[in-house]
Image: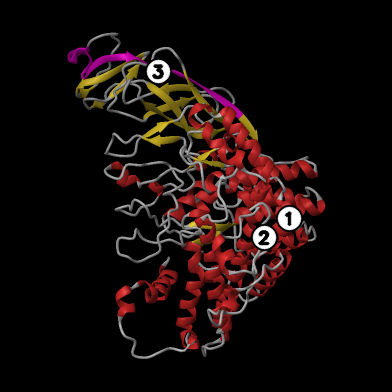
Amino acid sequence: MKKLLFSLLILSTGLVSCKKFLDTVPTDNLLPEEYYDSEAKLLNALAGVYYPLATPSMYGNFLNSDFNISDEAFYQRSAQTTGVPVYNFDYSENTVAALWQQCYVGIERANMLIANIKVAKIDEAKRAPILGEALFLRGYYYFLLASNFGDVPLKIVPTNSPAAEDVQVPRTPVKEVYAQILADMTKAEGLASKISDIGFAGRVGKTTVQGILARVCLTMAGAPLKDEAKYADAKTWALKVRESGEHRLNPSYKQLFVNMHQDLYDIKESMWEVEFKGNGADGFGSNGRVGNLGGIQMQVATGIGLKIGYCYGFLHTTARLFNLFSPGDLRRDWNLAQFNYITSYSDRYYYNYYTAAQVYNRDAAKFRREAYVLDNKNQNTTPINYPLLRYSDVLLMLAEAENQINGPTQLAYDAINEVRRRAYGIDPGTAGATVSVVNNINLATAGNTGYLTTLNNIPVTLTGGGGTGATAEATVSTSTGKVTAIAVLNPGRGYTSVPTVNIGTQWTSNTDYAANTQVFNGNNVYTVTTAGKSTATAPVQTSGASSAAVTGAVFTWAGARATATATIATSTVDLGGLDKISFQQAIEDERSRELCFESLRKGDLVRWGKWVSTMNAVGAEIRSGAGTTFSYGGLAGSNVVPKHVLFPIPAAEITVNKAATQNPGW
């Protein structure tokens, strides 16, 4: 699936990555235009325009980790007191400078390709999408610059020489930069291929251009430009995507992301992805750190850690995000890890499930290394793709734009409710549904002794209650032999009363039991100490071992069975009856539930004019509510001040480009 783009990248980067090649004496010279004299060379150049997106300075690392701090996540390192993750840095910050630099690398490569697009003698039908993608990417890089830095130098022709005067470029007002972004992307929309013709999400198709144009227009409609006429344009572009017939939601939110981990493109929903490939072992491919920096922490580099994949777990959820999810919303436990890994086992993955109170323990788990299939997992690189545009985002943008223009019309409700129905596992065409689910399971204080510490993740069975489908699993402490937490793995559907909860495996007659397994009967837990087939007589003793002559297998009393009680809850799926302000808040909350950790939240909060106030509030919430273990997580929110709406113009730019000025406060 990734062959085309990455074979081109290997060719396009090989000339600058092999020291031995560079040490050789050239036998001839190529004029610049000779780099563009065939379709293959144009595609090579296009791959080079895409490539900055995959660098560590962008989505290969910092944009999906350190720069992803918002009201959704805090940086899970108490010693981190400086840098972008805690909003304590200055204009010399290297990671900010690297983002600036890579955007301009992409822009310069796009400028070169656009300037030489006519050199190759090829069919115009083949030339058009290459030009369209180059124009779009130039616009996208400028969009990243404008939304992160404000006024920036605008340059749409190639650099002819490294002369000093060529780098003395004043910052262009952000309104003019956005005008160029719109011009580039609008022209690109008429040239780009259909995504169904491209066949994978690593290259930009027509509907992707339309979707990103909707994002650009929504950004322009909000702060700081507040060009509210752009809401109509955002609606127009989002409607084009919807009416194209090219896209639909994957029925399973979880499976959508599993596909991204496994190189299975779902172009119906995942419209544009930054591609990563391989584990770096062969020196080829393009390796990112998606799921390695933010993901479920696993800092064991051997044994089970190698099977799962090393992860630093830098991003932990906030209670604010956790509490946005209603009972039955299946996105919560995929996005926010229910567990950490138990590393003392080697035969398979075992999970230490969190209790209901351990909200701040939860890793940002949308990208998790155990979900992909590559063997010999590299400690610091992954091949997991990173989404830049999904169809659900387009639907939510459509709903927001329509609400801003006309209030919450049926069009707006249809768009947001389609996203919500998928979140609860309901067909998008099913209107007016509610879900009654198993919400959580609470351990009783009595009993709960004698569980084997060599076993873990024991089954939990739910019966009755009028519903179906609920499943759960329990964690056994490897030190105390007690059940410590129970996780609802599937909340099920249709529960009208509380189901009965049974922890562990119920003894049954006429069953072959292996030694060192455990069963319960009544309120007692038994360990099989001699293998055999059970008779019709169950073990009932409260000490010692049963008789093989009576029970078949020998069951030795281990302790008192753990018990628990489930709670159920009902959630209304479809929204309705809201006023314009309430619907806007519903959109803002839905975007967080649906799109968390996809590098969109800060931009959303900025355009809504809520960045500083929201970060200050969430910082205070963490400091007061996260306990002594995680109170440090409020540092970023507490540090945010108005200057942090934008990044500083990097010191490297200010030093070289004397025509550039600095952003306020920096």
- Tags 2 and 1 in contact by the CB under 8 Å rule? yes
Q: Amino acid at mark 1?
A: Pro
- Residue 234 occupies quadrant: bottom right
Q: Position of residue 196 (x, y in %)?
A: 55, 68
Q: Which residue is mark 3?
A: 562
Q: Residue at x 70, y 45 (%)?
A: 610
Q: So how many labels did they put on this image? A: 3
Q: Name the element at disc 1.
A: loop
Q: Position of residue 656 (x, y in %)?
A: 56, 69
Say if 646 sits above or below 300 in the image.
below
- Tags 3 and 2 in contact by the CB under 8 Å rule? no
Q: Amino acid at mark 3?
A: Ala
Q: Which residue is mark 2?
A: 150
Q: Quadrant of the N terminus?
A: bottom left
Boundaries of the magenta span: 545-569
Other-residue count near label 1 (Cα within 10 Å), few / some / many at <14 / 14–19 / ≥20:
some
Q: Is residue 221 left or right of residue 244?
A: right
Say if 374 sits above or below 657 in the image.
above
Mark 2 and mark 1: Cα distance apart in space: 9 Å
Residue 49 seen in render = yes
Q: Is residue 61 magenta?
A: no
